[in-house]
Amino acid sequence: MKTTFDVNKIRKDFPLIDGQPLAYLDNSATSQKPVQVLAAVEQFYREQNANPFRGLYELSNIATNAYEEARSLCAEFIGAKDSCEVIFTRNASESLNLLAYSLGRGLTAADEIISTVAEHHSNMLPWQHTARAIGATVRYLHPDREGNFSLEEFKSLLSSKTKIVAMTQMSNVFGRAIDLKPFIDAAHEAGAVFVADASQSIAHMPVNVQELDVDFLAFSGHKMLAPMGIGVLYGKAKLLEKMPPFLTGGEMIEYVTLEDTTYAPLPHKFEAGTVNAGGAVGLGAAIRYLNAMDRTAALAHEDALTARAIDALMQIPHVNILGAKDAADHHGIVTFTIDGVHPHDVAAILAEADIAVRAGHHCTQPLHQYLEIPSTTRASLMFYNTFDEIDRFADAVSRIRSLMGYND
Ligand SMILES: Cc1ncc(COP(=O)(O)O)c(C=O)c1O
């Protein structure tokens, strides 16, 4: 597929990979950061640094404004109605733990949570942990071999006991974009709230919380060009308002006595302690960067890279690709096995060839158990990758079996 997207120009923004020998194909783990993000973080600490909300002096107001501007950018990016619906956390894992803890306080032993076998541990263990503490039940929806979920199976799990549904919008193993809307509508009909894990989808497709009518949505900044240590929890204000806080301490209060506490309004009720203002500013800069680029062309380039990788790998004997047959359903994620070769050997051989991929269970052990595959290798792409990198990757994969001593 031809696009007008100029990847060589874009790569100039990414000093760690531009002109470097390393083909960085581990973007699902974390993305690289453009100079615009690095500059914004540096500028915050050089020119704006003070503890937000705490000072009555000018510099503290500047820091507060920088932090809140990032929140507004984020709210706009995901189509939230109000920026108070955006809570800054450390990462998607913390966002999901916050939800499991806070929503879990309203559950009883008779209640049920529905999740899926394909979840990242970060959207599985918090629910498992909460359910165990309360005596509630977690029921699991199963993906098919292409990474799809059946709405019929989902409806058969739903009942008046279902209080929470927690489901990924894009598996970090399959890369398929799940059309969550019918699942969200069905969950609402049953009276449950819907939590979407957008950790992988956020950088690879447009996400709009109001169009989805999703109740909660979690993601990490570091997978979408922002620094590590800043994450987002979106929640509908009317639900967040009713929920108890997760972490307590400074900044999240209205009034404290020795006997009792009243909490600050949204979003501060959920942001205890000194915030990661530099990280939030970096996330704001990442969103500005994504907004300024031709995102449709960037995503088309990503799709074209994915198609090139999948087409090439499909030609290599003994290589098995997980998930959809159609490259358009992979969104930059190419997870595979090579018959007779351990994924760690695959990744080590690729590392020798200056190609960074990931091997293991990708924090999805139950999914690997369900698929009866102990572990896999994953190449994950971003718009700044090149066809040349994909060709090098495919060429290196094609030589792995013979390097391991196989003749066919
Ligand atoms: C689908 C999915 N959910 C959640 C997470 C957790 O993200 P983090 O480690 O940034 O909290 C990841 C990270 O790989 C992921 O891929």
Image: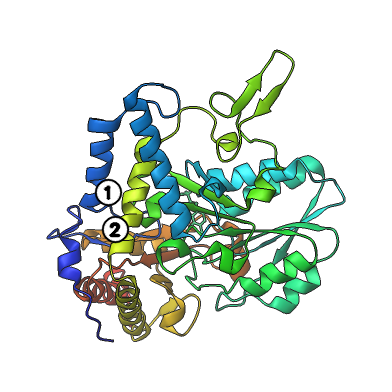
Residue 104 horizontal side relative to residue 224, left or right:
right
Q: Percent position (x, y) of residue 399?
A: 26, 74
Residue linked to disc 1 = 37
Nearer the observer, 62 or 368 = 62
Q: Determine whether label 1 and label 2 are within 8 Å by CB.
A: yes
Please, what secondary structure does the residue beneath circle 2 have?
helix
For the point 57% across and 69% down, which residue is it? 211
What residue is shown at x 55% (from left), y 66% (from top)? 169
**Residue in front for this viewpoint, 358 or 13:** 13
Q: Is residue 21 above or below residue 125?
A: below
Asked if residue 372 can be seen in this view, the reply is: no
Q: Is residue 97 above or below residue 50?
A: below
**Residue that protrudes farthest toward the top in the picture:** 258
Q: Disc 2 residue type?
A: Tyr
The total number of labels drawn is: 2
Q: Is residue 280 visible?
A: yes
Q: Residues within 10 Å of mark 2 (few under 14, many from 20)?
A: some
Query: Which quarter shows the C terminus?
Result: bottom left
